[in-house]
Amino acid sequence: MSGKDPELSRLGEALSSARSAYAAAKKITDETKARLNETGSRIQTFNAKISELKKGIDAEYSAMRSERANGDRDAADEHRSLAQSMQEKLTEIYESKKACFGELDEARAAFNKALDTQKVLRDKVQEAWDGFNARLEYLKNENAREQAKWKEKPCKICGSTIRYNVEWKHIPNLCKECFDKDKANWEDRVCVKCGKTFRINKGWEHIPTICGDCRKIVKAEKAARENEKAAKLQAEKESAEESARLAREEREAAASALVDVANEAVGGAAEGEN
């Protein structure tokens, strides 16, 4: 993977954004959960106070009845007053508890909403993560395929390793150092036929005096001459074969004529004898 892949960057940003949104949603979920728990704790506290007050009221009324039975009305009135005070406190707590149930419903609704949002964003994080991983896997495979195109071969001069790509149009035979040294062996020459400049290597065994285009022309002309010569030889061969055929036919005709003459002579002699 050469360079930075734009699509991978985009998917990475999408993943980061999804994670941030999920973290924010989780924070809200934690806050609403804490509020829900706090409201529930207050209701439990109210329940504990209600239970305690009910026990206290029952105890005071029991003490009141006991004092009345003993004829101590003042003490009985005092217990009744305490029981009534506790009853008033109990009523206040019930009202507070009732209001707290309203808060509990709101807290529960807020928590459920936050939790649903968190689940949706969690799925988006997973989706973004899957997309990022899929692109990353694709790029890894692409990189592996690209790396497979790279091969190594020894330099023809020094033998050091040359790394090349099989898709290169021109695959080097020399390493960079030897190539740089070899450049000194190259020089320009003027074609003796057309005057065009072409490059030669002084290390070549046979240094041309004409450029590549002229060499092609000379080669084409040579091929044309050779084709013309071959065609001429073929024509001479065919002419000789035709002459031989005609001579053979003449010989065969002469021989056939002699046979006819001989047959006539033999036939004439036979008639004379009769």
Image (cartoon, rainbow, N blue to C red):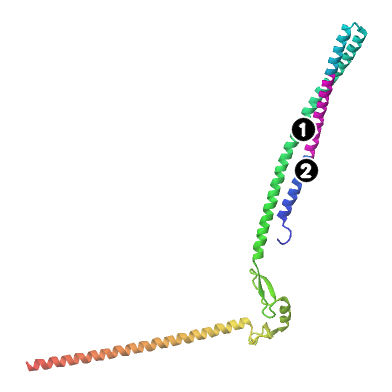
Crowd class of label 2 (few under 14; some 14 to 19; many from 20; radius 10 Å): some
Q: Secondary structure at mark 1?
A: helix
Quarter of the image with the C terminus in it: bottom left
Crowd class of label 1 (few under 14; some 14 to 19; many from 20; radius 10 Å): some
Q: Quadrant of residue 171?
A: bottom right
Label 1 to label 2, Cα distance in Å? 17 Å
Say which residue appears at 85% left-offset and 15% top-offset.
Answer: 59
Q: Relative to residue 24, is residue 234 depicted above or below?
A: below
Say which residue appears at 35% left-offset and 89% top-offset.
Answer: 243
Q: Relative to residue 166, is residue 52 depicted above or below?
A: above
Q: Nearer the viewer, residue 148 or 11?
A: 148
Left/right placement of residue 219 relative to residue 172 reads left
Q: Quadrant of residue 63?
A: top right
Q: Nearer the viewer, residue 198 or 166?
A: 166
Q: Quadrant of residue 150?
A: bottom right
Q: Main secondary structure of the magenta part?
A: helix
- Across and down, in percent, residue 202 comes to 69, 86
Disc marking residue 110 = 1
Q: In the orientation shown, which residue stands out farthest toward the right?
A: 74
Left/right placement of residue 244 relative to residue 84 reads left
- Number of numbered labels in the structure image: 2
Left/right placement of residue 194 relative to residue 245 reads right
Residue 212 visible in the shown view: yes
Give the magenta part as a residue range: 27-53
Say which residue appears at 66% left-offset and 62% top-offset.
Answer: 144
Disc marking residue 102 = none
| Circle 2 residue | 23
Say which residue appears at 91% left-offset and 11% top-offset.
Answer: 78
Q: Nearer the viewer, residue 268 or 114?
A: 114
- Across and down, in percent, residue 210 comes to 63, 85
Residue 91 visible in the shown view: no
Left/right placement of residue 268 relative to residue 25 reads left
